Image (cartoon, grey):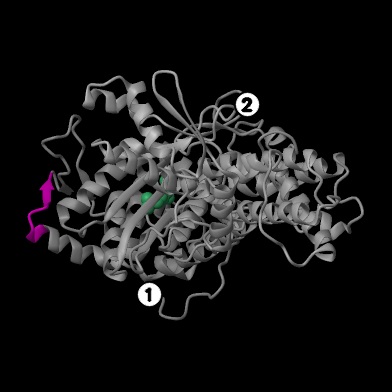
Amino acid sequence: MGSLAKQLSLIVGQAFEDAGLPVELGDVRVSDRPDLAQFQCNGAMAASKIARKNPREIANDITQSLAENPVFAKLEIAGPGFINITMTDEYIQNYIASTMQEERMGVAQYAQSNQTVIVDYVGANIAKAMHAGHIRPTIIGDCVKRIVRFAGFNALGDVHIGDWGLPMGQIISEFELRHPEWPYFDDDFSGDYPKDAPFDYADLEKIYPEASGACKEDEARLILAQTATAKLQEGHKGYTALWKHFLKLSKDHIKANTDAMNVEFEIWKGESDVNYLIPEIAENLKDKSVLLESDGAYIIDVTDKADKKELPPLIFYKSNGAVTYGTTDLATIYDRLKTYDNIARMIYVVDKRQNLHFQQVFRASEKSGYTKDGLDLVHIGFGTLNGQDGKPFKTRSGELPRFDQLIQDANEKARARIDEANLAADLSEEDKQDIAKKVAMAALKFSDLSNQPHMDYIFDLDRMSSFEGKTGPYILYQAVRIQSLLAKAQDITKQTTALSINNDDRPLALLLTQLPDVFDLTYRSLSPHYLCDHAYNLAQEFSRFYAKCHILSEEDDAIRNSRLMLCQHTYKQLDLCLSLLGIDIPEKM
Ligand code: ARG
């Protein structure tokens, strides 16, 4: 059905067309000056260049031709030729009544048939504890997946674990130096390797930096690691068995951390999962003369004549035969194209510092012919999580804070805020904990998502956890308030009647008509901040409406029911916006 502004654009566009002008000039949007009008159309200025007429004159012609239409309460011309538009309450009521009844509340479907979209996010690496740097891809990736899913696509999240590069060989060789007696290192071993790892995740997390440090200091040590990496990639039995332990422990670690954020993955693959495809891809690309030898290595030239800056080649095989991060990403595209025949898009939510890498990979997929008509490869490069000093967020001892620690801090902060505000006072300890978790998630997610992904953003737990200002907790608080009001209303009225809006509730009603455009902007830009703004505006406008209007205490049945209906619609929209952001509303607070 489209937003109310879109519907008006059709009407006003028609008037432009009838005047012999391009229909798009009739584009209507929400007014910049809500004190003067609800909507505005600025097309007369552009029309004046085409028609060589004064823009005010054109605006006048257009408003005169619209004047007959009973949907307009007021049409005025302002400044050089802006058309200010105010609708009748009846028109707004009808629009709300018809769209809010719908499941999608007027939001369009964007997918044709059952198209698949893969969202690749988090990409945590084996044996390295998730840290502050994983907060943004977890939050943004999950939100993008929800947006794409609501747009109608079969959206699948892929965790794409970093499980195949040099770090694997570094850890394997470190274990081999420390425990040469383990069966994984005995080439003659023919029994079954131990089912459980002879170490736990904490050991793994400790050994990795030690191994990588040793490799930095000592060339011979590095060669050991490189050799082990190459042997693993060639399928060495013992190394593979050992590596499977790393993988299992690391997956458990990643799952526990992302579960705590209520973030899921449909695909639990990693870089290693495409290893078996690499020889076949190499053959294919040699045949196509896309894969070229260069100083013992194999590369793909990804340059294009039109490039302003020369892109370095994608290194497919290093001279020692090992594959690179670029190789596994290219092979993953190949794999996804084979696995999902209805694939429309792959969206990578990865640090913006990896932009060059994705340019190379995307270009290599084109040059290799690993693409299809209309396939869209997108890198959403997010900015850095900074501390309040504007520098990358670090602990006092100068390290990146751990992911689980950040979640715990956010939970504790939320709990303190709840107690401070004397919320949930009469609820059980268990309920309080549960509410604190939801408030913490709302704080973390909303503050991240209300920034555009590519911008760096300042992580300030104090500010984001506040129940005041543009925060997740503030919006949750308003949502819970509506919910409890509606719960009370159930005893009073079951049957809601038609809307009848007036001066006090009109701003809230008008805000509700914007959802389809808000979603459209969000989906097209894949930037969730539009949804955040809308949720915040709804919460604020509701709060004003609540302060001004009698709702439950309203004596006029028709008005009370109309207001309750407005509350219901507001809740439904807030719930949708928050659920797209990955935020759950507690039942009570
Ligand atoms: N493991 C990578 C890293 O830590 C991120 C993976 C992102 N996804 C991808 N398909 N490259 O930098």
Image x and y of residue 326, in percent: 29, 49
In the picture, measured across the screen, residue 319 lies left or right of residue 146, that is left
- On whether residue 516 falls in the magenta region, the answer is no
Report crowding for label 2: few under 14, some 14 to 19, many 20 or more residues within 10 A (C-alpha).
few
How many marks the image carries: the answer is: 2
Front position in the image: 264 or 588:
588
Numbered disc 2: secondary structure: loop
Indicate which disc, 2 or 1, sits on the residue closer to the N terminus: 1
Q: Quadrant of residue 287?
A: bottom left
**Visible residue check, residue 116:** yes
**Which residues, given as a range, are shown in magenta?**
286-294
| Residue closer to the observer: 214 or 21 | 21
Quadrant of the image containing the N terminus: bottom left
Q: Quick one: which residue is furthest to the front in this view?
A: 68
Q: Nearer the viewer, mark 2 or mark 1?
A: 2
* Residue 565: image location, x then y, percent: 69, 56
- Residue depicted at 57% across the width and 39% down the height: 533
Residue sitting at x 75%, y 51% = 559
| Amino acid, disc 1 | Asp
Q: CA distance from mark 2 to mark 1?
A: 56 Å
Identify the residue under disc 1.
188
Which residue bears the numbered disc 2? 388
- Identify the residue at image location x=31%, y=37%: 16
